[in-house]
Amino acid sequence: MDKAARPALLGICVVLVLASIACSQQGKAREDGQSRQARVDLSPTEANDRVIYRVPPEYPDNARRGHIEGPVTLHIIVNGEGSVEEMRPLQGNPFLLMSAMKAVKQWRYRPYVVNGVHVEFASNVTLKFAL
């Protein structure tokens, strides 16, 4: 690298470090609850007991034709109103995954309340596909 490019590179590094520090401070504020509610972790059984509306998954035609069966496990985050806000797959056959996610996204849960405040909760959901 030539000497003329070094000051520009140093400036870019300084900007990146400052941006990283700013993001870190925002993350700490969220962790302290200043800009975000606390999240409660529930066992799959506890979360299942809170379901008030459940949509069964449709068995995908390609999985049916291929005689594909098995469980699909999703990690979900439910917002304070009881709707599934986020989810990510933990395990399961890819041919069954989208059907499971589409169904669980429609589920509704009884809100979780802590000290009179609705808070989000996280849990795992397992759907079993069998022919």
Image (spheres, rainbow, N blue to C red):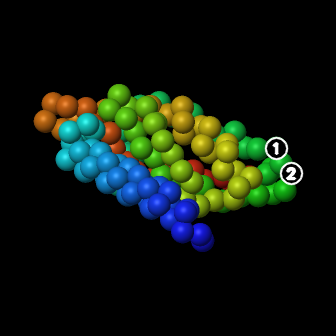
- What residue is shown at x 15% (from left), y 30% (from top)? 116
Cα–Cα gap, marks 2 and 1: 6 Å
Q: At label 2, which amino acid type do we have?
A: Arg
Q: Position of residue 104 (x, y in %)?
A: 54, 39
Q: Which residue is mark 2?
A: 65
Q: Is residue 83 above or below residue 131?
A: above
Residue at 51% across / 46% down in the picture? 87
Say whether residue 56 is visible. Answer: no
Check disc 1: other Cα within 10 Å, few if <14, some if 14-19, many if 20+. Answer: few
Give the labeled residue for mark 1.
61
Secondary element type, mark 2: helix
Q: Position of residue 53 (x, y in %)?
A: 47, 30
Residue placed most toward the observer, 124 or 79: 79
Query: How busy is the neighbourhood of tag 2: few (under 14 within 10 Å), some, or many (20 plus)?
Result: few
Residue drawn 26% across the image and 37% down it: 35
Q: Nearer the viewer, residue 32 or 128?
A: 32
36 left or right, relative to 71 = left
Disc 1 marks a residue whose amino acid type is: Asp
Viewer-proximal residue, 82 or 45? 82
Where does residue 22 sit, x and y in percent of width and height? Answer: 32, 48
